[in-house]
Image (cartoon, helix red, strand yellow):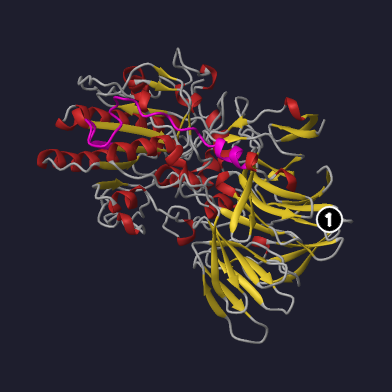
Amino acid sequence: MTKRVLIIAGTLIATVAAATMTGVILPTNWHLSPPHGAVAAVGTMPDGLALSPDGSKLAVVDGGFNPPDLRILDAGDLHELKVIPLHDAFGTPVWNDATHLLVPGASTGSVLFVDVTTGDVGMKEGSAGYVTAVADADTIAVDTDPEHAAAIVRTALGATYVANRGESSVTFKPRGKPAEQIAVDLHPAALALSRDGSKLYVACTDADAVDAVDTKSNRVVSRIDVGLPQGAGASPNGLAVAKDGTLFVSLGAENAVAEVRGDRVVARVPAGWYPTGVAADAEYVYVSNGKGERSHANPDFDIRNHHSAGYVAAVLNGSVRKIARASFTDATTAEVTANLPQPLPTPAQTVVRAHGPIEHVIYIIKENRTYDQVLGDVDGADGDPKLAMFGLAVTPNEHAIVRRFGIFDATFTDAQVSANGHNWSTAAFANDYLERFWPPNYGGRRKAYDFEDGAVASTPRNGYLWDDAGRNGVSLRDYGEFVTNPPAAGGVVTTHMKGLIGKIDPRYPGFDLEISDEARIDEWQREFAEYAAHGNLPALEIVRLPNDHTSGTRPNSLTPQAFVAQNDHAIGRLVDIVSHSPYWRNTVIFAIEDDAQNGPDHVDDQRTTFYVASPYAAPGVHHAHYTTSSVVHTIELLLGLPPMSIYDAVAPPLYDAFALEPDLRPFDALAPTTDVNAKNERTAYGAAASERMDFSRADAADPRVLNDILMHAGTPR
């Protein structure tokens, strides 16, 4: 019987018989199949991998949240041969010869020259900014800035191809001649030459395609569709050409590897969670999986310990799978499709439909809490009261909302942190640029935070809810999401998002912990009153209420309890205001965290709070597995919008969250039971550290240090 390697909690612990292994369900509600071969645990966000010239070893660059390294694995059974710590690294390694590797040094400004025998690390060459390793063969390496190279290939004659992720082009630079631009599909991120050099394959991540460029004419001659038919979002992000000419493509967002012959996909095989790169020899395919083999519960996440292993980004360890090429069959192709959430039948009668009784959606996006942190103390649901840091005493309105309208104890964020969280919350997707580059940013090795500002490389193919609404004639108003605050008091809020121009409240600020959520609701209420008076409330409102993020124990700032209590009262006020208006009878209010990174949870570190408030809400405990994309899908169904990605297209809608008959009683907000004006003293635990932290945007502060401070800040347990 074939032996395989079992990964539990990101650690390589045992070999077990294949028959004993079962798949897992991810927070996204997608399944992962058991590995079709050996599997090994590696570090956080492995960016890619490369086979040694003799095929005996694999080199993997771990470039995620934890300190980066170069990991050498035995290509036979994937056991670890050596781990070489690096100051920084990002991308696909390149074998220079049998014992030396070139590794992109990212923020070091150098290409690292690594001796895998001795572990010595030197600087091969240097330049300003981020650099990309290039050898003299057809090799690939990844850079980290969208306006620069996403990948580079050098031909045997010394000509160079450079993929420009942000510009959707490939630059061709022949030796000694001027460069020319080759137009390709959206967001190219990986390159590979065919064995005879006649074609350049370009993985275009947001086009779900691999473009084939004729290297004589430098024009795209064919487009290979690699995505599943259920919707946009395959994220092809790694390429490998075997000696027989077969092309293999890692499909990050579909958790799969595609086999391409000619100009079409002939088979797929399930991979781990978010594959990032692929290598191939005559018999096997090797794939690096950026998020590994599963998510994790973290009830023992000790936020008093700066180095606690329970932080979501720190435990999101990747993996490498070894797959026999003979495994690529019709059966494994069907297995990939079966790993998607299976569609729910539409009930014969449901209010979750266009042109039904619900005509308006108010969608609230909050910041960073787990389910157990807030609702773990609710009886009858799956919570751990010991983990309720901001329970009933701090959040009376959220507790009243779940008692009245229903509690959801199995709702998960699709995201791990705010960088991808606000994209998942508004696009039901985070593209390859986002998923690749938030981990080093959160690890403190990449300064650019270009995830919520309309940067070209981070914008997914079908855009965001506001784009979807605009394309389909659905009215929308945005309050604080994807906006830029004015540089000085009295200025107006602006946006870089084309689809939001003219649709934002210029007086409603984005993330700024110096501004009270109560003040935000005051401004929202001002516009709502005007809409109510004129009968022209937009069909969709997006409202950002971010202050449950807190600013630790920063002197003279609100205490963590005050921030969360203020946020709770703001939500209660919004529901109160709507429920006492003429719009109550045809409105639903959804509220969810963008991510769940800042606390422990006994079920999963991506389980979060989710609230529904509507006359049609069905009370009780809802145990169904819902996700951020489920919420987005439900909004789309209510407003007659098409899905934006494969994730909202297949996410189970919230059919069971609604009753057929309305309960029109209004909701009365509860006064805070915690002092919402309480300030931190300079003597508070962590005050000095909090004062040094950057709270100018979500998650800029080191979350491990911030969580430590929150635990010591007198939070009720």
Question: Is residue 402 found left or right of 715 in the rendered image?
Answer: left
Percent coordinates x, y for residue 138 in the rendering: 72, 68
In this rendering, position of residue 185 left or right of residue 708: left
Q: Which residue lies furthest to the left in this view?
A: 534
Q: Which amino acid does label 1 sit on?
A: Gly
Tell me what residue is drawn at x 54 percent, y 18 percent.
386
* Residue at x 34% of width, y 43% of height: 515
Q: In this view, does 125 lie above or below 622?
A: below
Q: Is residue 708 shown to the viewer in this render? A: yes
The extreme top residue here reads 380
Q: Position of residue 421 (x, y in %)?
A: 47, 43
Q: Magenta span has 563? A: no
Q: Is residue 188 left or right of residue 555?
A: right
Q: Residues within 10 Å of mark 1 (few under 14, many from 20)?
A: some
Residue 178, by quadrant, is bottom right
Of all residues, the one furthest to the right in this rendering is 117
Frontmost residue, 257 versus 133: 257
Vertical position of residue 169 compared to residue 324: above or below? below
**Quadrant containing the N terminus in the rendered view:** top right
Q: Which residue corresponds to mark 1? A: 55
Q: Nearer the viewer, residue 704 or 652?
A: 652
Residue 487 seen in the current view: no
List x then y, in percent, for residue 251.
Answer: 59, 50
Q: Give the range drawn in magenta.
A: 333-361
